[in-house]
Amino acid sequence: MPPPVSAHVYLVPGFFGFANLGELTYFGHVRDTLAATLGPGTTVHAVRTPPTASLPRRAAHLARTIAQTARGGGPVDLVGHSSGGLDARLLLSPGVVLPGRVDVEAIARRVRTVVTVATPHHGTPVASFFASVQGQRLLQLLSLSTIYVLRFGSLPLAALLRLGAAFARGDRHLGVNSALLDQLFDQLLANFGAGRRRAVGRLLEEVHADPALVQQLTVEGMAVFDALARLRPGVRAGSVVTLGQPPGVRSTLAAGLDPSAHATHALYGVLHRLAGRATEDPPALDRAQTAALRRAYGSVPTAEANDGVVPTRSQVWGTVVHAAAADHLDVIGHFADATHVPPHFDWLASGSEFDRTRFEAVWRNVARFLTAT
């Protein structure tokens, strides 16, 4: 008998995805969990995309990756975190023209399901801030600190002190002190070996050369995208929605006595305030979406509610596969759990109290959605 045709699941990283840095895995926990849940008949691929390139460039890269790796003619499912969900949507838009020579239509015909995870379908106010000079420096620091925590487990004490000071003594509107951010960035980069510094430098050079994605993720930019992007007929669409804990006494207490958690909690507070700057009414929900959010959260989230990066209402698209009380990175495995093998590291302490049990519940529901007929 011929071997069974394998299905292929592609995990598409979001904005500034650091999947391109060797052993540092963006989707490591997700990939392991999905592979174990879906079984040997499915191959789970983690895609590497240009970190801040335009959506057409990123979608074209996704198409090339599928063309090169989806052997055997089996069905294809796409799971995109954050802006990775938009890459998938653009690839599947009927009649789309992408850069390069890949037969996009042939690839799109094989896709049966797409799930977006904490994706800014209607934009995020955070993108408008990241487009500023100060925002670009903060974005670089966020990315570098994420890489550092995933490599070493926590930030060094001296860096934590500078991080806390950067927000405690900073701008009264955003709570950011640019001079201290620069010092912290230089300190963290210096703690890497020469090879790692070169790899991070190449990543940042790539970001500097093509930052188009930042502007496209604004509320205004996504209004144009959403008006033009259409779901391909026959493709099942779903979304994982996240709602973060608003910064306050409860989230501060959840940080416990860990100085690293308190420092990154201050950073989370800044991002949460930025993401909550809603300028327009949130998009309308259908009856099933409304019911799913009410079951998960007790009520429909307001326009200001967010996960620290993306407004919660901006994330709803198609069937609500799962609605989690989590921050933007919790759901892809970046939460604190040093006892798990391999360990989970949390670089952004939001006070969500997200754990391995909740993480597995999210990805069981995603697996069920991918395999439903």
Image (cartoon, helix red, strand yellow):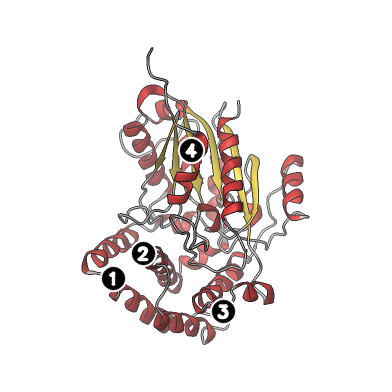
Residue 151 tag number: 2
- Marks 4 and 2 sit apart, C-alpha to C-alpha, by 28 Å
Query: Which mark is first along the chain, 2 or 3?
Result: 2
Residue 342, position as x, y percentages in the image: 43, 55
- Which residue: 34% across, 75% down? 188
Question: Which of the two discs, 1 and 2, labels the residue nearer the N terminus?
Answer: 2
Q: Foreground mark, 1 or 3?
A: 3
Residue pictured at 22% horizontal, 64% vertical? 195
- Residue 184, horizontal then vertical, whole percent: 38, 79
Q: Quadrant of the C terminus?
A: top right
Residue 86 seen: no
Q: Is residue 329 left or right of residue 162?
A: right
Q: Classify mark 3: helix, strand or loop.
A: loop
Whichever of callouts 1 and 4 sits on the residue coming sooner in the sequence is: 4
Please report contact status of discs 4 and 2: CB closer than 8 Å, yes or no. no
Select label 1 or label 4 by which is in front.
Answer: 1
Would you place residue 97 above or below residue 225 in this image? above
**Label 2 secondary element:** helix
Residue located beneath label 3 in the image: 257
**How busy is the neighbourhood of tag 1: few (under 14 within 10 Å), some, or many (20 plus)?**
some
Mark 3 is on which residue type?
Leu
